[in-house]
Amino acid sequence: MAGNSYYYRKLHSLLGIIPVGMFLIFHLVSNYSAFEKGHAGFIEQVEFINSLPFVLALEIFGIYLPLLYHGVYGLYMAYTSRNNVNNYGYFRNVMFMLQRVTGVITLLFVVWHVFETRVQVALGIVSHDELGVRMHEIATQPWAFALYIIGIVAAVFHFSNGIWSFLVSWGITVGPRAQKVSGYICMIFFVVLSVIGILAITAFTGAEFQDTSVLNQ
């Protein structure tokens, strides 16, 4: 693996932005419809996604396989990489450490979230129209709600800080000034997307998500 580690890392970095990171943005913004438009708006988004052509192939090759590679190789990197105190200051080394920690948290969170939602649909336990109810059941459990907040913030931080690293490693931001500016932009992006994700999961605690009957009213 050592001889090809450069290419493995490049692929890991690229997949973290496209398509995994792009899907994270889409997923959080789509779920935000639960906060903005309620249960009916959320189901409308679910139906739109499932109406897309070749949706299963898109999920497998556009989400799950890239995510699997990014997650597994990310774990390898998390346990083999070391802080670089010679080339980077204290702040960047802390961010590097947080990148590894949030990567592990995000992977565990995603596996749990997929099992509780997409897998349940695939097994026929939950229908697409009942996903809002399923999320309500999860979000109204204090321990699960807390884990969702942690998972959302960890995922968004990992992606936002990963954008900064991507820009550096791919030679897009060259020099301290460009890297400093991109750092500010990435942190603003982190805050905004975190708020969107938190509002979305908070919306599922609403009483209208208790059952699907509101969709017929």
Image (cartoon, rainbow, N blue to C red):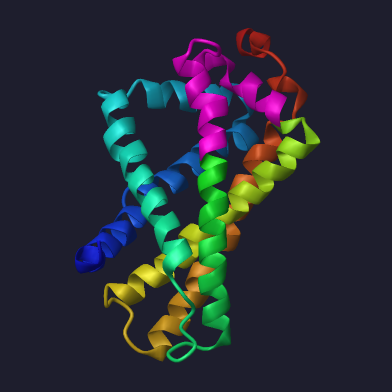
Tell whether 25 sits left or right of 147: left
Residue found 27% across the figure and 78% down from its top: 171
Residue found 69% across the figure and 35% down from its top: 203
Question: Above or below — where is 190 with respect to 40?
Answer: below
Task: Specify the principal SS of the magenta part.
Answer: helix
Residue found 58% across the figure and 58% down from its top: 192
**202 and 38: which is toward the camera:** 202
Image position, residue 118 (x, y; %): 48, 25
Tell whether 144 sits left or right of 195: right
Part of the protein shown in magenta: 111-138
Question: Above or below — where is 43 with respect to 178?
Answer: above
Image position, residue 145 (x, y; %): 72, 39
Question: Above or below — where is 81 with respect to 196?
Answer: below
Image position, residue 142 (x, y; %): 80, 37
Q: Quadrant of the N terminus?
A: bottom left
- 114 is within the stretch colored magenta: yes
Residue found 29% across the figure and 76% down from its top: 172
- For residue 54, say whether it is visible: yes
Image position, residue 129 (x, y; %): 54, 15
